[in-house]
Image (spheres, grey):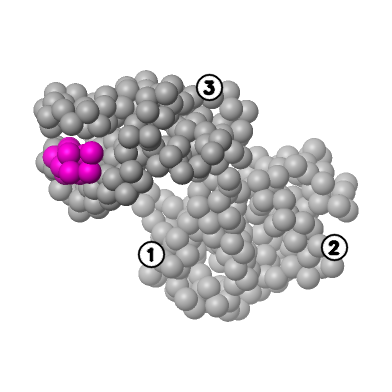
Amino acid sequence: MSTLTSKQPSIQRLFLQLLKQNTLQHAYIFEGKAGTGKKEMALWITQSLFCPVSENGACGECQTCRRVKDHHHPDVVEIQPDGQSIKIGQVRALKEEFTKSGMESRRKIVIVQDVEKMTVQAANSLLKFLEEPDGDITVFLLTTARHRVLSTIQSRCQLIHFPQLSRQQRVEELTAAGISDDKAAILSQLTSDTSQAVALSKKEELLQLVIAVWKWYSFISKKDDQAFVYVQTDLIPLAKEKEEQQRVLDLMIILLQDLLNIRTQSNYSPAFVKQVKELEIDASRFRPLTVAQLMEVGLTGKKLLDSNVAAQGVFEDCALQMLAVIRKNG
């Protein structure tokens, strides 16, 4: 059996059984967070359907399997958002493609990435396609936000949930991709998407943000009013874009999770590996309730950023509220 989908071995075993029994449904929704292996699974099933070599799942090595993997197979149609959405023209082109006979077999496969990003018109057009499948067609709809997919589309598909990988699995994936242990520890908490984590690991700005957030926390933990001034002097110049501003609070929350878990769990592996000694000291100093209140301040700050409140004001307010929590609770 190919190891392509080792992220989700139980789901792979399920589909291997369905393939052997020839009981594959005509449409599936694969839902789960980014990085959980949805696209890899859809491609592995597709390879298995077309592979001329192996009867026990895709061999992964033959010319047919390689063409599917490289997105060059003529009977496999893949759709992804064009800009911010999947448009009706893309679905119409899909329908036109499927009126043709298969180039190499009677079977055709369609894989739709981020199906929740379809426009209303595109979604309604896809619904008609699912209601009246023409020929030997299998459809895989991939989503990280199933609640945004039309309920009528969902009702015509078999739902498969892809659980999030454990933190240890994510760390191992990142270190296998050549990322250092300390970076992998933090990136595994920032994102579950390996490709995004690899891209972030190459940015010097991320390391600067990690250092800056640690220093910001240090001022707060020591009840130092410099935490307020530090926002303008250091944080804002580093976090000019909204994505970076969100990352500041993400990193603060991850740091506080480290603090809480060191206090409440044995053998916990923190994300802030290089600061573990200082975290252990603070974990013995702060009550879990205090840390939980600090995390609540950070989460509220993230909601304000999502509502387009200016980052400097959000960070300064977070600093003041966190200082107040520390002073009140010790």
Q: CA distance from mark 1 to mark 3?
A: 41 Å
**Residue occupying image coordinates x 67% and y 70%:** 26
Specify the quadrant of the image occupied by residue 243: top left
Q: Which residue is mark 3?
A: 180
Front residue of this view, candidates 213 and 222: 222
Q: Which residues are magenta?
A: 319-330
Q: Point out which mark residue 119 bears.
A: 1
Front residue of this view, candidates 70 and 263: 263
Q: Which callout, 2 or 1, points to the residue nearer the camera?
A: 2
Residue 145 in percent (x, y) is at 45, 60
Check the image and report above or below for 156 versus 233. below
**Residue occupying image coordinates x 81% and y 51%:** 57
Residue 318 in view here: no
Instruction: First in sequence, mark 2 or 1: give its number.
Output: 2
Q: Secondary structure at mark 1?
A: loop
Q: Point out which mark residue 20 bears.
A: 2
Residue 113 in percent (x, y) is at 52, 54
